[in-house]
Image: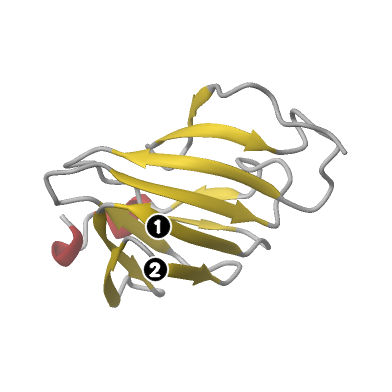
C-alpha cells in the first residue's frame, strides 16, 4: 500500500484546478488516477477528451452541467450524489453556472492524468456551450 501525496493543487489542460490524489506521479499506480475537483461558481472547463482512457466522476456537493458527444449534443444537469461515466475518446465539457462550488471525485484509467488530455477548441465555440 502507498499513500498519495499530501494535498496539492495543480492546473489541468482542461482549464480547471484539481487536488492531486493518487497517480503515477506520487505512487506506483499503473492503471488509474484518483483526484478531487473543486469547481467554483461560474467555472467552465474547455472542451476536451481523454484519448484511450475512461473516467468516472462522483459529485460530492453542488450542482453543474455537463455536455458530451461528438458535437457536445448531449446535456445533463448533475448534482450531489450523481455518478457520471465518460467512455474513452468522448468529447465532454463540464460547467458550473450555479452560485456554489461543485465538489467531485474523479477516477480515470490514465495513471498520469494529464497525459491523455486532448483539448478541442473548435467545440468551445459551439453556441449552446458558450
Relative side of 42 to 7, left or right:
left
How far across and down, in percent of the image, does residue 89 sit? 57, 67
Contact between labelled residues 2 and 1, with CB atoms less than 8 Å apart: yes
Residue 20, by quadrant, is: top right
Q: Quadrant of the N terminus?
A: top right
Nearest the eye: 2 or 73: 2
How far across and down, in percent of the image, does residue 6 sit? 63, 21
Task: Give the number of marks.
Answer: 2
Relative side of 21 to 2, left or right:
left
Nearest the eye: 92 or 124: 92
Residue 5, by quadrant, is: top right
How far across and down, in percent of the image, does residue 23 sit? 71, 38
Spatial separation of the CA atoms under disc 1 and disc 2 = 5 Å
Residue 130, by quadrant, is: bottom left
Q: Secondary structure at mark 2?
A: loop
Badge 1 or badge 2: first in the primary sequence = 1
Q: Is residue 25 above or below residue 35?
A: above
How far across and down, in percent of the image, does residue 44 sit? 26, 46
The residue where tag 2 is placed is 82
Residue lying at 40% horizontally and 63% vertically, measured from the top left:
92
Residue lying at 31% horizontally and 67% vertically, measured from the top left:
67
Q: Is residue 104 above or below residue 93?
A: above
Q: Which mark is residue 59?
A: 1
Q: Secondary structure at mark 1?
A: strand
Nearest the eye: 103 or 54: 103
Residue lying at 49% horizontally and 60% vertically, measured from the top left:
57
Residue lying at 56% horizontally and 48% vertically, measured from the top left:
117
Q: Is residue 84 above or below residue 30?
A: below
Amino acid at each position: 500500500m502507498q499513500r498519495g501525496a499530501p494535498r496539492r493543487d495543480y492546473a489541468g489542460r482542461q482549464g480547471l484546478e484539481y487536488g492531486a490524489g493518487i497517480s503515477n506521479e506520487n505512487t506506483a499506480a499503473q492503471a488509474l488516477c484518483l483526484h478531487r475537483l473543486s469547481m467554483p461558481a461560474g467555472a467552465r472547463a474547455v472542451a476536451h477528451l481523454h484519448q484511450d482512457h475512461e473516467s468516472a466522476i462522483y459529485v460530492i456537493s453542488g450542482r453543474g452541467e455537463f455536455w458530451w458527444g461528438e458535437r457536445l449534443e448531449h446535456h445533463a444537469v448533475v448534482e450531489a450524489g450523481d455518478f457520471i461515466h465518460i467512455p474513452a475518446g468522448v468529447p465532454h465539457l463540464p460547467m458550473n453556472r450555479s452560485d456554489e462550488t461543485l465538489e467531485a471525485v474523479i477516477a480515470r484509467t490514465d495513471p498520469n492524468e494529464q497525459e491523455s488530455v486532448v483539448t478541442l477548441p473548435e467545440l468551445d465555440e459551439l453556441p449552446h456551450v458558450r
